Structure formats: C-alpha cells, structure tokens
Amino acid sequence: MQEPKTIEQALVAVNEKIAAACVRAGRNPEEVTLIAVSKTMPVEALREAMACGVVHFGENRPQELRDKQAEITEPLCWHMIGALQTNKLKYVVGKTVMIHSVDSESLALAIDEETKKRGVVSEILLEIN
C-alpha cells in the first residue's frame, strides 16, 4: 500500500481504517474521536488538517501547546498527550479538553489544585499500573 502524500490523503486513509475497525467491533464510527497528534508539526500543517475538518489536536509538550494556541485562534479541542510536570500546568489547565497523561497521584492533586484556582474543570485520563 502506498503511503499518503498529503494530510488530506492521510486523513482519508485513517478514517477508512477507523470505519473498518468499527464494522468489525460492531460500533458506530460516530462514537470515535480522531485526535490528530500535532507535536513537532508546523502550524501550516495543523491548518491543512483543520481545512479537512479536524478539530481535535494532541500535543505532547506544554510550551508547544501554548505557542500553537497563541497562533491558532479558531476554536479547537486541544489534548495534552505527553508527560506533564507540575510546573507546566499553567500551560495546560483550562486550555485543553483533556489531559491524557496523568501518571501519579501527586500530579492529579496538582491538577485539581490548579483547576480550582482557575475555576475550570479538567478532564483527565489516569494511568494505573
């Protein structure tokens, strides 16, 4: 199979795979949220994905998230997908729809504290080993 050459072609291929997986699992593809991982990608690439209908983007570096949010003012759903240190919470809490990488009780408590300070709600995925 030939690799997609454009972001649009890549999205078509991924959505076809999602649809096929949903058929196999007996699920509705509408229940699946595609999160485009935008780490290290230039803003122009995000804009190309946005033009194809992508609204969920995942970043793994808080500062990169901050910088992209400053440049892209359109309403998007940002996800923090990388390791997160408590000193970087200011870049993430209240600025993402979900934090996918909570790997300790201390981080969860720090997120809770920052969330209360800002008067927002932070959805998280907690990693349990």
Image (cartoon, grey):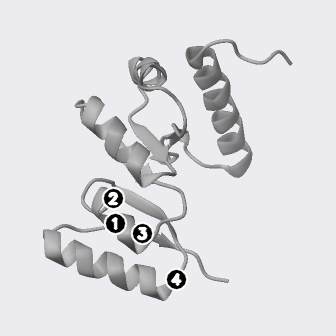
Please say if the residues under marks 1 and 2 sit with CB atoms less than 8 Å apart: yes
User: Which mark is drawn over residue 104?
Assistant: 4
- Local SS, label 4: loop
The three-letter amino acid code for the residue at tag 1 is: Leu
Q: Nearer the viewer, residue 90 or 54?
A: 90
Instruction: Specify the quadrant that holds the C terminus.
Output: bottom right
Tell me if residue 79 can be seen. Answer: yes
Residue found at the far top of this picture: 5
- Local SS, label 3: strand
The three-letter amino acid code for the residue at tag 2 is: Val
**Label 1 vs label 2: CA separation?**
5 Å
Dot 2 or dot 4: first in sequence order is 2
To which residue does mark 2 refer?
92
To which residue does mark 3 refer?
124
**Label 4 vs label 3: CA separation?**
12 Å
Q: Residue at x 41, y 53 (%)?
A: 62
User: Which mark is drawn over residue 89?
Assistant: 1
Using residue 55 as the reference point, say whether residue 19 is left or right of it. right
The three-letter amino acid code for the residue at tag 3 is: Ile
Please say if the residues under marks 2 and 3 sit with CB atoms less than 8 Å apart: no
Dot 4 or dot 3: first in sequence order is 4
